[in-house]
Amino acid sequence: MQKIDSLAKGKILVFPGGMPKSLEFLQQCQADGKPVLGASSLAHDPTRQQYAAWAYLPYVTDASFDAALQALIDDQSVTGIYTPNPVIWDHLHRTLQTLAPGVALLNASPADAELTLYRRAQSQVATWLEQPLAIGAAKPARSSASSLQLAALFRHAELIPGMCDREKMFALCEIARHAVDGDIVEIGSWWGKSAFLLAWLARCHQIGKLLCVDPWSNAHLVQNDATGLVDQVSAQFDASEALTVFEMNLLPYSHDHVNYLRLPSESGARHYRQQREVHTDAFGTTCYQGSIAILHIDGNHTYAAASADLACWSGLVHAGGWIIVDDYIWPYGNGPQRAGDEFIGRYRDRIATAFVMGSALFMQLSHRLDEVHVVQG
């Protein structure tokens, strides 16, 4: 898209004004203080009230469309046009400089813009498959998901907000192929980006069910990071809203194999050790095995919290199971890294392989940890 701040003082025409992308563009213009003129070919368009200025244009198939557009441009001093409609965009792309020389078509092809995201997912997966990750796992690999399946996973994961980098996503896809059977437990889920990935991989490779443990509490967001930058941003979030977003993101992909405990990590570990069922209004009742195939730790990043998460949960991980410490590389502190390094030092003889991919530490256990030496949750 061209920069709209180069359009002098003329109006920007948004047509059709009621399309979702048009309304997103309107919000951007309003935030930037740009004058916008909405237009529609509907006699009664319910979105017209969102625009400060509004006009009617005939359908692009109408013989009078070009003349009506020309007249509107002249009358309203229009200097740029935004349209997410691919048919209208194509017509303007071919005719606008003849109809109204100097008036800019502000966006690229809407079809290309939409398809670019899918093409990018396919390209990323092709790169992954050409350079497989050799992780030296103790368990033979399951069959890989197809390139189409992985592209679908990558594309849908992009729709969920979160900080899961692509390298970590690739590693998650690989370790899932080397996972034993059992539950997948995630400590710290927030909006659900990595939870979606884990839930999809669990079903794809028939590993087990996903349990997410997160208090969704603003008090538990406090990281005490050295600069205070993280805590300052965290204070702006509504934790209860984050839970609702999590539910919205996971429900379409849940097939009775996802649930959550709205509890701090240690309380969640006690519940998991004592009960096999978890019930929520959103996901119903889910039964778990009580033994973990993949443990993903992404909770509070203080050293004390990351260490406690490992202590509470690692003794429940199967031999051959995986433990992932997210944000092992974290620019705001070294809590996860200190906790991860100490864990490796303590249980070196029980770890089959360990590596860092993206920002996360991945460890596969060769033997189940002696629970006598692991703090009980």
Image: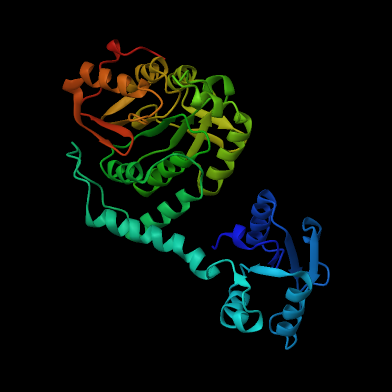
Of residues 39 and 269, the one drawn nearer to the viewer in this rendering? 39
Of residues 267 and 107, the one drawn nearer to the viewer in this rendering? 107
Q: Residue 2: give x, y in percent of width and height.
A: 55, 63
Q: Which residue corresponds to the image point at 36% horizontal and 55% vertical from the top-left?
A: 150
Left or right: 308, with 254 as reference point: left
Scheme of image coloration: rainbow
Judge whether residue 146 can be spotted in this image.
no
Q: Could you say which quadrant of the image residue 38 lies in?
A: bottom right
Determine the residue located farthest toward the right in the rendered image. 44
Q: Could you say which quadrant of the image residue 63 lies in?
A: bottom right
Q: Quadrant of the C terminus?
A: top left
Determine the residue located farthest toward the front in the rendered image. 8
Of residues 10 and 235, the one drawn nearer to the viewer in this rendering? 10
Q: Is residue 209 above or below residue 101?
A: above
Q: Is residue 226 above or below residue 16?
A: above
Q: Residue 88: give x, y in percent of width and height.
A: 63, 76
Q: Is residue 345 above or below residue 317?
A: above
Q: Residue 372: give x, y in percent of width and height.
A: 29, 10
Q: Could you say which quadrant of the image residue 239 lies in?
A: top right
Q: Quadrant of the N terminus?
A: bottom right
Judge whether residue 98 can be spotted in this image.
yes
Q: Which residue corresponds to the image point at 80% horizontal and 58% vertical from the top-left?
A: 52
Q: Which residue corresponds to the image point at 42% horizontal and 17% vertical from the top-left?
A: 305
Q: Which residue corresponds to the image point at 26% horizontal and 56% vertical from the top-left?
A: 129
Q: Residue 269: give x, y in percent of width and height.
A: 44, 20
